[in-house]
Image (cartoon, coloured by chain):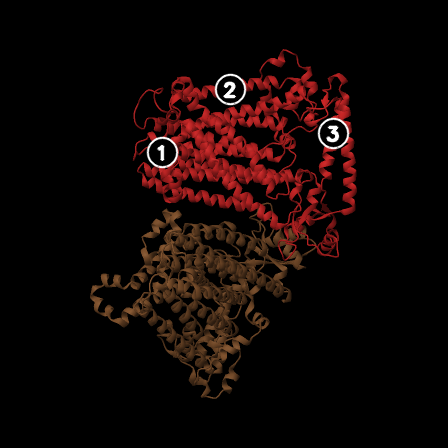
Chain colours: A red, B brown
Amino acid sequence: MLVSAFLTSVGINVGLCILLLSLYSILKKQPGNVNVYAPRIAAEERAKERGSLERFVPSAGWILRAWRASEDEFLEVAGFDAYVFLRIYVFSLRIFSFAAAIGVFVLLPINYFGKDFSDIPNQSLDSFTIANVQSGSKRLWVHFCAVYLISGAACCLLYLEYRGIAAKRLAYFYSSPPQPNHFTILVRGIPKFDQYSMSDTVEEFFTQYHPSTYLSHQMVYHTGKVEALMHEAEMLYKKVLQLKEKPRFQRQHQREGFLGLFGSKVDPVDHYTKKLENVEENVRSGQLDFLQKKKEVPAAFVSFKSRYGATVASKIPQSTNPLLWVTKLAPEPQDVYRPFLSAPYLQRWISRFVVMVAVFFLTILFLVPVLFVQGLAQLDQLEKFLPFLKKILTTKVISQVITGYLPSLILLLFMKTVPPIMMLFSAMQGSVSNSGKQKSACIKVLYFTIWNVFFATVLSGSAFSQLDNFISNPKDIPRKLAVVVPGQATFFITYVLTSGWTGLSVEITRLFPLIVDFFRRHFSNSIEDDDCAPTFPYHQDLPKVLLFGLLGFTYSLLAPLILPFLLIYFSVGFIMYRNQMLNIYLPRFETSGQYWPIVHNCTIFSLIFMQIITIGIFGLKKLPLASGLVIPVTIITLLFNNYCGKRFL
Amino acid sequence: MLVSAFLTSVGINVGLCILLLSLYSILKKQPGNVNVYAPRIAAEERAKERGSLERFVPSAGWILRAWRASEDEFLEVAGFDAYVFLRIYVFSLRIFSFAAAIGVFVLLPINYFGKDFSDIPNQSLDSFTIANVQSGSKRLWVHFCAVYLISGAACCLLYLEYRGIAAKRLAYFYSSPPQPNHFTILVRGIPKFDQYSMSDTVEEFFTQYHPSTYLSHQMVYHTGKVEALMHEAEMLYKKVLQLKEKPRFQRQHQREGFLGLFGSKVDPVDHYTKKLENVEENVRSGQLDFLQKKKEVPAAFVSFKSRYGATVASKIPQSTNPLLWVTKLAPEPQDVYRPFLSAPYLQRWISRFVVMVAVFFLTILFLVPVLFVQGLAQLDQLEKFLPFLKKILTTKVISQVITGYLPSLILLLFMKTVPPIMMLFSAMQGSVSNSGKQKSACIKVLYFTIWNVFFATVLSGSAFSQLDNFISNPKDIPRKLAVVVPGQATFFITYVLTSGWTGLSVEITRLFPLIVDFFRRHFSNSIEDDDCAPTFPYHQDLPKVLLFGLLGFTYSLLAPLILPFLLIYFSVGFIMYRNQMLNIYLPRFETSGQYWPIVHNCTIFSLIFMQIITIGIFGLKKLPLASGLVIPVTIITLLFNNYCGKRFL
């Protein structure tokens, strides 16, 4: 990529960011937008107090407010998972500041003066990468030292971070008041005996084997449709209440018939009241039906007199058949995910297998749109396939937009659909808690992102046919990666700009919820949900941050130019997500820090990947000694990971 | 290999077997050999009663006696590990009878009439293998059905076997009386506080956290040399006692000086009595020293009032730092392996890593002697390298001995050195029990055997240079295996003859212990050890049996001729090991059935390996549809393994 095209991309993204951030600081002050920007805070009075002129002046006060909250306040308001999420930014800032110092002040000059002196604008950005250094040059030993320094620093920081989080997590547990779920375990796989009800079986089992600690139990029942009907009735009730508060002329009249499009116009209050009565009737008959039948499900929540008792019962195998009397600590009440509470082991096992296969194929087949995007990214290929567009494509502005901006934008839009799909898959996998579901989806999206964004881009951008070669020649992987990875440096810098910078501004401006909220308030009768504060989509944002980490490590040696852009991303992201966590997202359920092992493993993977590429690079650059001397640091990194696994598990 | 050379090998081995077995049935009846053949039974009187002529007639009574023992008797006498070991023979007999029925009556005729009709003796044994079937032949679908049938039968039998062993294991646990180790846990990583002794720390910790179940504890101390001295004193004491019982003229007089070769002759009783007094003096001073210092080690055995309490304490993490207060159920008193009781976590971790590296290199470098053996196996190569031996080598008898017998014999001798080496490695790995040490050595020897006997033979016999190709082209593995594996069928049949048949006869005749015992009794003063019954070397024999299983599965389709030989091995082996377990080996420590998961996993590996080779074979024989249709059965086998892992863990 030429420097000029690159600068265009930087310009567009910086412009977009500034625009969106200004918009945010203005929109945030509008009293009507409280539901969008501060749904957690009953901030209406404060918003009203402000002068009308001040409301339209961009300001940076929110940054200060986000910064000012102390750690304990933050933990209390945002929960432990949010704390862990922000620690990724802190860790990334630390390690990439260090890497950037080495990269920009030491490696970049070496790369740039590797071959010749020429003026910048007409030159390709590749002259800043390691590809510009001559083969066999003694200067490459500087890169070699950098591998050791960065790996060592990363391991130290990872250790400190893990230790800090483990200590914080303990403190958080100790300080939190006892909750019902601490005393309760979830028992599944309760055997069915003909003459007894399952409830009796559970009672007998636990009074026999845990006589001193067993307190009581609650069976899980098949509720059938009653639960859904109850929810519907609740929503209708709220709607009717809100409509009644409005003056009659403000109510939008509605047609009775199909989809509200046909039939005679009626007052919405009457319409919904009638509907509510119908639903209530159904609920009553459903409840009666339920009480008569009481369909038991082989699952129960068993409560103990002490936390110790519950822990013991959850840790110790209860039966000689490990598929019966399966115990685990119960999730928090609001975290329970019901659909799979009753599923027998075999069903969960099969559905897990089916989901794994589905995820695998989704991950592999997703390459098709990525390939299409890569086709767009390369201007000459576009011209070849669409010759009639040649005139437009050769226009300077358009060609620069296409090469610099479009590919990553299209990729971004495609990627948006993946987290919900993976969440659906995880839901089918038989998790019993929402947090477990989200964590599992997070891992799936992470694999997906690393494969489809990073590897597919690297392979297809340079030569997609190499994928097959890759699988059939594992020994040559380092060498081949060393050929193809540096070539995609500029693409990933623009990716940081689009997906990172602009993505952050879009996130903070919340454009989509803003539009939805606008329409809801002005054009529909839908009610204002009391708890409209959303939960934070970890499964969507965490893999993205980790991908930037992977990019940072991979390119810190090859093309250190990416590091300053990443540093800006991480520092802005830290403040922004702090703001979002404090004002917008409500932690409804918690994994209490279980995301950190994912982060840790992914960072170790990134480090190892960086080292493998370095082995290949030194091989290509005819420095076999350096190539061989990188292997010890790889082994040490793996040992370090093993140690951390034992130490902090 | 020609049929005639093969028949020579069969002849030699059958002859050896008959000779050794006759020898066994005679030697067994000699009263002097009780220590070798029935060290567990005080059978002297019975032996003396027999007439002197009968003593020298070969008989098969021992087979009946081995067969007659009931399962419960066997369990009581031989222990649960021996039971599990014999179940491998039962399982192998069942599955390979089934496979042999298919192989010999269906596949063998198809293979043999695959191309042409010619007389047997001048033909190569390869005409009995699948290589003889023409490409694209419809007859290969019979082989395809056989894959499904054998895989299905193997999975069913594996499941039944696993279920049976799990049930038996439970029954064995329930029936055994409570032992001290059931109430005791081993605690390691006890933290050291300056003002307290570790013993106080342990007492305080367990009275605080397990007040209702904690009973007492026993610290582990650094005994220094006292323990070794005590052992030496005991041995000397026994020796003196035995010598005093002998009449004076039978005692072999001994010289006082270096190695008993120089100095004046003395009566051995005086000599050893003096020595014993010296040692006793040392022991007393050592004990005094020990009592004064009491060097505590951060490990302790903690006893509880109930088995439940001990189990709870061993299963629940005791500290927020998983490297402190590490608990596990204590091994049986006679099973404790002391050297690593006190090792801190980091030391164990490092030594485990070092051992892993050492085992890896031993496994890889062992290829060198195997290569040499393979060179011997191929007559034409020998002639090329040693032209002066040409005359001898072309002699019919010698050439047949060399091709049919020598290679596997040399391999066998080399292999004999491996189990002790692996045992040494496992000892350095930080195990706290002898049984754990042996189990870990067993896994190491298994990997070693499969790699060095099976893969190295397969690869180097046909084309050793393919190994490199193999690593760099994983996609072509099935196809390449399909080329090289069938070529080694005859080698492995002779391996079954040498290592299997003759190995069994050598094992039952106990030639080496017989010779040692003979020399000990006639030429030395060494004492008769009371407990000279050896423990069964599972780490040496189990991998061998599993290798035969692998051979059976791999060649059941390719060269079914191996199956009858295997069946004979398994049936003779079953009876022989039953005899050995009942009469010779004493179960000093037990893993109580932990060998079965190893057997299970290895069998699954063999199945998958067979299926992969079949995929390659069908690819080579131009039946891509059949090749593809084998993949489902591979997936089902893997799922089955996963299910068993969950169900029986």
**Chain under numbered label 1:** A
Residue position for label 3: A236
Please state, as top left, top right, bottom left or bottom right, where the N terminus of chain A lies in the image: top left
Labels 2 and 3 in the same subunit: yes
The three-letter code of the residue at mark 2 reads Leu
On residue A296, the disc is none
In the rendered image, which residue does mark 1 sit on?
Answer: A142
Q: Is mark 2 on a helix, strand or loop?
A: helix
Mark 1 and mark 2, same subunit?
yes
Residue B427 in view in this figure: no
Q: Which label's residue is closer to the chain start, 2 or 3?
A: 2
**Where B305 falls versus B8 (above or below)?**
above
User: Residue B461's x, y, as percent?
Assistant: 33, 59
Total residue callouts: 3
Q: Where is residue A225 in the image (x, y as percent from the top left)?
A: 72, 39
Q: Which of marks 1 and 2 is nearer the N terminus?
A: 2
Q: In which quarter of the image is residue B136?
A: bottom left
Q: Which mark is residue A16?
A: 2
Q: What residue type is labelled 1?
A: Val
Left or right: residue A131 compared with residue B173: left
Q: Secondary structure beneath disc 3? A: helix
Give the CA distance from mark 3 to mark 1: 69 Å
Considering every residue shown, the one lying at the far top of the view is A53
| Number of the front mark, 1 or 2 | 2
Tell me which corner region of the image, top left, top right, bottom left or bottom right, holds residue B16: bottom left
